Image (cartoon, helix red, strand yellow):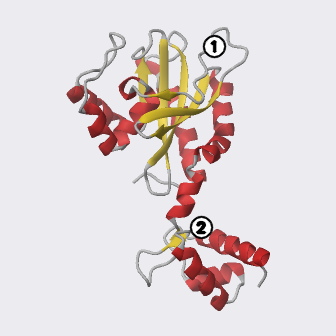
Amino acid sequence: MSEIQSVQRAFEILAAIAQWPNGAQLSDIAEITGLPKSTISRMLTTLEKIAVVQREHPKAGFQIGPAIAELIAQPSWLVSLSEQPLQQLVEKTAETATLSVMDGDRLLYIAQKSDPNSNIQLRDWTGIHFPTLHVSSPSKVFLAYDLALRQRYLSKPLERFTENSVVDPKQMTIHLDQICQQGYAWVREEFERGLAGVSAPIFGRTGKVVAALSLYGPVFRMPTDENEKEFSDLVVNLAAEMTANLGGEKK
């Protein structure tokens, strides 16, 4: 078997496994690909060794492995995947949309799109780290779903930036639990006066949050507490589409 043919067959096998989220048996893969079971078995042995596929136990079905999950969660891939959702947010709201990830214990903005016709342009945060996690909507998303990160961060004093900043750890814990329940996070003038934003989580295959999709704008143009649903739903739904495209799920 040539090297090119081996690569092609490996991708055919992976595509077949992806159709069975609860695990694909050898016979399932053979039926979809038309490849001999002996060939599939040999390739699965190799793919399993390098964590491209995995099984919960030897008799369980094959699933896409953590090596693939780690690959598609890389910032460069996430940026490509976010191109359309970010553009949709801008077109539907005329505000600024961002995508961010965690880099260690700091938030990192990896993509941003804005309406070029807007009279008020927000700062471009692309490539900038944001270490203060309790006053921005995307970092609140990560704090809400990552309990280890939350514990580390809330063990330190919280800095007050405006009168709206939440600096009491107990109050912040309640707030973060609410974010988990509703699936999105709002901030209104907590880091900077005049700025508001909403973010929603994007989940990877392991069930962890791999990125946050956000929408920012001047507070006078963003909806108030009473009518925030339209913007919240828009961000949540687009983040859910990105989760689906990653093969991810909330756990």
Q: Amino acid at mark 1?
A: Gln
Query: Dot 2 surroundings within 10 Å: few (below 14), some, or many (20 or more)?
Result: some
Return the residue at label 2: 18
Residue 84 shown left or right of residue 74 in the figure: right
Q: Which of the numbered marks, if any, corresponds to residue 121?
A: 1
Q: Which of the numbered marks, if any, corresponds to residue 227?
A: none
Q: Quadrant of the N terminus?
A: bottom right
- Above or below, 115 relative to 154: above
Q: CA distance from mark 2 to mark 1?
A: 42 Å
Which mark is first along the chain, 1 or 2? Answer: 2
Q: Quadrant of the C terminus?
A: bottom left
- Above or below, 236 relative to 18: above
Q: In the rendered image, which quarter is residue 176 located in?
A: top left
Q: Position of residue 177 (x, y in %)?
A: 30, 37
Mark 2–mark 1 contact, CB under 8 Å?
A: no
Q: Position of residue 70 (x, y in %)?
A: 53, 56
Query: Dot 1 surroundings within 10 Å: few (below 14), some, or many (20 or more)?
Result: some
Q: Position of residue 115 (x, y in %)?
A: 69, 20
Residue 125 shown left or right of residue 107 in the figure: right
For image coordinates 64% across by 47% down, the residue present is 77
The local secondary structure at tag 2 comes to helix
